[in-house]
Image (cartoon, rainbow, N blue to C red):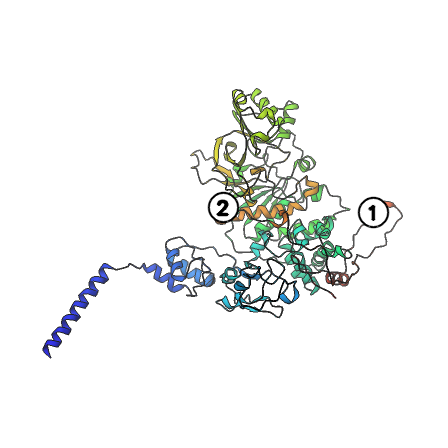
Amino acid sequence: MLGGLLVMGGLGVAIGVGLALASKIFYVYIDPKVEAVEEALPGANCGGCGYPGCSANAVAIVEGKSSPTSCVAGGPDVAAEIAGIMGVAITLKEPDVARPGCKYGVQDADVKYLYQGIMDCRAAVLLDGGAKVCSIGCLGLGTCVRSCPFGALSMGPDNLPVVDTEKCTGCGTCERVCPKHIITLTSTTERMIGEYVTDECTAPCQRSCPTGINIPAFIQEIRNGHYEAALAIIKEKCPLPLICGYICPAPCELSCRRNLIDEPVAINSLKRFVADYEMRTGNRLTPFKAPGSGEKIAVVGGGAEGLTLSYYLARLSYQPTIFEAKPQLGGILRYVIAEDRLPRNVLDHEIAGILETGVEARTNRVMGHDFDLQSLFEEGFDVVALTKGGFDSRQILKPDPSGYDASVPGVFTMMDFLYSLKKGKNVQVSRRVVIIHSGREGLDLARKCRGIGAQKVTIVSPLACDELPVELQDLKRLAQEGIVVRPSTVVISLYGVSRRLVRVALEETAPAGEPPAEGQTIRADTLILPAGRLPEFVFVRSLEETEPDSGEIVWKTIETFRTFPGGPNGICTPPEPGRISDSSAVVKSLLSGRRLTRAIHRYLTTGAIPPIEHLACEAEAVPDVAEIHDVAPSERQRPAVLDVAGDSKKAWIFPSEYPGLDEAAAREEAERCLTCGLICYRRQT
C-alpha cells in the first residue's frame, strides 16, 4: 500500500516536473493585444478580411498588416472597439454588399442542354461551362446561397440569388465560391468610379453610353414608377442628366437591340424625363455621400469635366473647390453651345445641384495669373487637378495675351511654343528641354531650342526606333548636335519645386501583357507636349523628398493614366476614349471626370492606381446576338409637337421650349425596353 502510494506520488512529481519544463521550453508568447483584438472580433471566420480566420486577422491587425476596419462582418462598432485597443484613429468606409449580375434564370435563358447532375454550380460548370449558352450566366443551383455564413442569400422564383441587404456583411464568400464570378461585391462608391468589363453582364446600350449609365436598370425603375430611383442610378455615372437629355447624340440608341425589329428605345428622352421630373417638382435628389477623410482638392476649370470631377469628389466626402477663369461655371456648355440648343435655366439647375453637394466655386480666377501651384499648396490643398479643356476652348473662353498657357511651370504645348516663336515673343528655354513627339516636326523644334540656348534636348517617343522617321533614327549623329532621342519611351510623371519644373520621369514601353520596365528620372527645366491642350495633370505634394528650408514646396504629378492597361502614351493618354476636340467630347468629358475621380481616390486611399483590365467599351468583341425573336413591334413614343407662334423659319427651328415625354408616354416607352443582358433579352410575346 505504502509502496504504491510512493510510486504514484513519484510519477506525479516526475510528470509535474516534465510538464513544467515543457511549458518553459515550448512556451509561446501571446500578445495581450492579439487576445483582446481576437475577443473583439465576431468569430465568424468568414474570410472577408483576406485571412483564413479571425485569429489570423487579429495577429495581422496587431502587426500592422491589416486595418482595424478589415472585419467586414463586425461593422463599424467592431472597428471602433479594435481601434480603441490599438490606440489609433480610423476612417470609416462604405460597406460592400453582394450583388448578382445575371438578369435571367435558366428557365428564361437559351440553354445548350438540360442539366441533371450534382446540384452544385462548381460541378455543373465542369460540363462545357454549364447549361447556359451565355458564358457568364448564373447556373441557378444555389451554391452561393448554401455558402453564405450569414443567411443573407436566397433563391428567387426566377432561379437567381436574392440578397438581403440587411443581413449581408460583404464578406465575399459568395463571390469566392461562384464559378462564373457573376455575383460580386459592390457599393455606391465602386459603381460611381467603376467601369464595365468583359466578364460582366452588360447590355449593348450600356457599353455604348459615353458616360456608362446602367440604362436597363434606370428604365426598369421608370417602368415601375420609381422616378427618383431611376435618377439615382443615372447620377451614379452622369451628374448632368438634364443637360445630356438636351445635347447628347445618344450613341446608346444606335446599339439598342430593338433596331433589329423596329425603332430603338428613346433612351435619351427617358433620361431627360426623370431629370425634368426632378426640376419640375423641385424635389432635388439628395445623393448618397460615402464616408471619407475630407482632403481638400483644387479643380482648375469649371467646364463639364471639372464639374463632374468635383461632383464625384464631393460624393466621396472630399472637399473640392473649382477655380474658373470666366464669371460663371459651365465652360463650353455655357459659352459655346447656343442657348437655343441648351437653355440656360437647365444649365443653371444642374450646376446648382452640383454645388449643393458641397462643392465650392471661385470664378474670375486664372491659373498662372491669380494663383499657381505654390499658392494652392500653401493654402492647404492636398491635390490640384487640371481640367482646363483644349486649345479650342481656351481660345474661345479665355485667350491668353502672352501667347501660351502658363498654368504649369516649364510646360508648353507644341502649338503654343511654335506660335510664340513665330510672333517673336520672349519664350525662355532653360538648359534641359524634353520634347514629346514622334515626327520630323519634333526634330525641327529640338534644333530651334538648341538655337535659342538649350544645352541638351531629349526627344521622347512611344514608337520603336525603326518606326520613327529616318531623320530620328541616326542617334549618334543627333547626339553630336546635343539632341538625345529616346524611342519606345513615355513620360510618366513631372517633378517640380514651387514655380519651376526640375525633373521628368520616363518609362520604357513594354509589349502588351508584360509589366513596364523600371522607370528613370532625368533633369528637365522645360517640357513641350505634342498636342494643343494640356493633359489632365493631377498634382500632389511629393513625400519622397525633403522640402527646402526656404519654404518652397516640392510637388509631382500622379500617374492617372495607370487606369488604362498599358497607358500607351504616358501622361498624354487621354482619360476618355475617342477624344478629337472639345465640341465632340463634351459628353465624353463626363467619363473623363469620373476616371480622374477614380485615379485621385485610389491614390489618396491606397497610394496606387491599379489599371482596369478588360474594359468592355474598348474590347474588340463582346458576346452579342444578330437577331431577336418573340418580340412584338411597337411604336416609339415621341414628345408632343408644340404649336410655334410666328411664321419665321427661325421660330420653327429654334422654339423657345423643347418639350419632353409626358409621364404616360415615358411609362409606355419604358415598356419597350427589352432589359438586355449579354445575349439574353425580355421576350414579349
Residue at disc 2, secondary structure: loop
Can the viewer see residue 152? no
| Closer to the camera in the image, 639 or 289 | 639
Q: Secondary structure at mark 1?
A: helix
From this view, report whether residue 449 is shown above or below residue 13: above
- Badge 2, how many Cα within 10 Å: few under 14, some, many 20+? some
The residue under label 1 is 653
State which mark lies toward you, 2 or 1. Answer: 2
Q: CA distance from mark 2 to mark 1?
A: 51 Å
Q: Are the residues at dot 2 and dot 1 in contact (C-beta closer than 8 Å)?
A: no
**On the image, numbered disc 2 is attached to which residue?**
608
The kind of residue on which mark 1 rests is: Ile
Residue farthest to the bottom, as pictured: 1
Query: The C terminus is located in which quarter?
Result: bottom right
Q: Position of residue 401 (x, y in %)?
A: 65, 30
| Image quadrant assignment for residue 40 | bottom left
Q: Say which of 614 and 372 sits in front.
A: 614
Tell me the quadrant of the picture where the N terminus can be found.
bottom left
- Spot occupied by residue 334 in the image (x, y as percentages of width and height): 70, 44
Hey, which quadrant is residue 124 in on the image?
bottom right
Q: Residue at x 63, y 34 (%)?
A: 531
Q: Position of residue 24 (x, y in %)?
A: 22, 60
| Relative image position of residue 326 (x, y in whole percent) | 66, 40
Q: Earlier in the sequence, mark 2 or mark 1?
A: 2
Between 529 and 510, the one lying in front of the other is: 510
Q: Report the amino acid beneath label 2.
A: Ala
